[in-house]
Amino acid sequence: MYRYDEFDHRLVAERVQQFRGQVGRRLSGELSEEEFRPLRLMNGLYLQLHAYMLRIAIPYGTLSARQLRMLATIARRYDKGYGHFTTRQNLQFNWVKLAEVPDLLADLARVEMHAMQTSGNCIRNVTADHLAGVAADEIEDSRIWAEIIRQWSTLHPEFSFLPRKFKVAVTGSPRDRAAIAVHDIGIRVVRNGAGEVGFAILVGGGQGRTPVIGTWIRDFLPRAELLNYLEAILRVYNLLGRRDNLYKARIKILVNAVGADAFRAMVEAEWATIRGGALALPEAEIARIRAYFAPPAYRALPTVDLASAVRDARDPAFAAWARTNVHPHKVAGYAAVTVSLKPHGGVPGDMTAEQMDALADLAERFSFGEIRATHEQNLVLADVEQAALPDLWRALGAAGLATANAGLLTDIICCPGLDYCNLANARSIPISQRIGQRFDDLARLHDIGPLKIKISGCINACGHHHVGHIGILGVEKHGAEAYQVSLGGSGDENAALGEIVGPSFSADAVVDAVETIVATYVGTRTADETFLDTYRRVGLKPFKEALYAAH
Amino acid sequence: MTANRLSDGAVVYFDAAGGWSLNFAEAATVSDRVAAEALLDRAMPAVKARLIIEPYLMEVALDTDGWRPTRERERIRAAGPTVRRDLGKQAEGFGFKG
Ligand code: SF4
């Protein structure tokens, strides 16, 4: 994985020192809250309902065992013994004390981590496919490009004060596991007719108040031109993006206002002026970054057909887990494993310090000491020998990390909502917990099959509800929590926005509504149809009728 | 009137003695707009003294158990996360109940 060079070390160390001074000046009264707020936000420090929250960047979701152990230490030393993995491959601590944050950041810097680009109107921490480097369908490891973008964007002087926050995601595969279509810029590694590797570029996707599926503005961008082209997009946005209205400041609004063709033309014109210029990537530089993501020392193992191995497994509980949580790997004899952070009745994405330590050990024992965070709030061990899967499964189980539900109905994306978040309208975690309890029967879950529920506690949509197969949005209605349900969203390569089914449900009724939706699907599906297939075939109507029949 | 403590972000309430309490039960209440606005002025010394940040007024209503925040948000701030009853005010013995 990527290791800091001298420049990174110095940069992060300087930032910690700088922030230590700023916190000191805030506590001594030299800085007012108005002056301090932007400074703390630049370092990932938010004020939430009960305490300060620190959001730590995990670039493209990749962590070493050593880093995860440090996060466990921090959870114990500065927080209340746990952390929360977010939908942007970051980690949040919910209970940090202002005066202790500089020490915390210094500890973090010892393992080459920081909290920059996790807040504010800058280019945020770049996200990538959690199966980067191991997915069988991959053209190239997306993390190479995410790292190149990170180096360019970190403290880019021109882009530290954008009209709004700016999110970039990269996938190296035709399958999109990074939800690139709902990012400000989505990048897909592609091969052109001549067999050259380059990028397809999508802009103007986003969630929040005005959800938009991004528009492709370039089918093929030569590799060397990636940063020049991104620079061109950012310049057009920086110049024309609206700064007068918070709700209209994202690039999606600009693309929509001027039209995709006009936007593309402006970007291409800007690009023409810098093409081949200072930001063109020399092959040697690409190779230097690629070397950081060189594959680990795989053993030569016989090819095993994963699906049949799972079928033949004698322990049904292991087989159930392997069916959903184990994924094919491009190297013979290996597999990638989803470590579920979605125990039924638990808090999606939460992990205790003990679990972090345990998983760090398991990563070292089974997966070359590396852990990935997914945007679906799970973790991944990407390089596990297939023969070791049963041992790993038992060890994960002992740590409460082996829920056999990856990709199933209870593998819910869920934002912190009103239990923690200052912006929330309604709680989201209790809804996910009650859904988890209601659908606790594993056989039933596996029969229902792939179904993504995503829950946000307000219109900011951190819980990705717009792209949930079932999306749930918390709203406040006459002072009470209520939930708006949408269906048919999808965040993958066939991205779609969900359609709202109708009037919102009370907190008590929303779990029943999910039950009704599932029953309607099960009663309507043909043999191999997934929920989304059925929805796309029959549309909203039968679901709507079932949900509101009694009214 | 409520705010967050500068040092750790903890939720605090302006109390009858003019200090800031962690306990919602000790919050001072007023019953009209004018008195409420006057209350906000009284937060300024604590802001200047770097004790609290972001003071604001919150609405409460009287029911059989006493004063109760009208919004769910404030009930949760007064108690702690509903999904972690072992954390926050409720775990420290003075969490708002109900
Ligand atoms: S969606 Fe809203 S409630 Fe949920 S974390 Fe984001 S801002 Fe907070």
Image: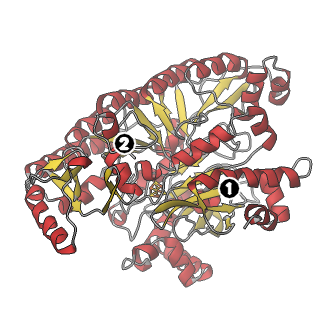
Q: Are marks 2 and 1 on the same chain?
A: yes
Protein chain holding label 1: A
Q: Which numbered dot is residue A470?
A: 1
For the point 75% across and 58% down, which residue is it? A194
Q: Is residue A1 visible?
A: no
> As rendered, which of A60 and A434 lies closer to the eye?
A434
For the point 44% across and 74% down, which residue is it? A247
Q: Which amino acid type is marked by label 1?
A: Ile
Q: Residues within 10 Å of mark 1 (few under 14, many from 20)?
A: many
* Left or right side of A264 for A137: right
Q: Which numbered dot is residue A48?
A: none
Identify the image quadrant of residue A13: top left
Percent x, y of residue A159:
37, 64
> As rendered, which of A38 and A348 lies closer to the eye?
A348
Element type where label 2 sits in the image:
strand
* Left or right side of A150 for B12: left
Residue A231 lies, with reference to residue A20, above or below; the image says below
Residue hosting label 2: A94
Q: Which amino acid type is marked by label 2?
A: Asn
> As rendered, which of A123 and A355 lies closer to the eye?
A355
- Toward the right, the furthest residue is A527
Q: CA distance from mark 2 to mark 1?
A: 28 Å
Identify the image quadrant of residue A192: bottom right
Q: Residues within 10 Å of mark 2 (few under 14, many from 20)?
A: many
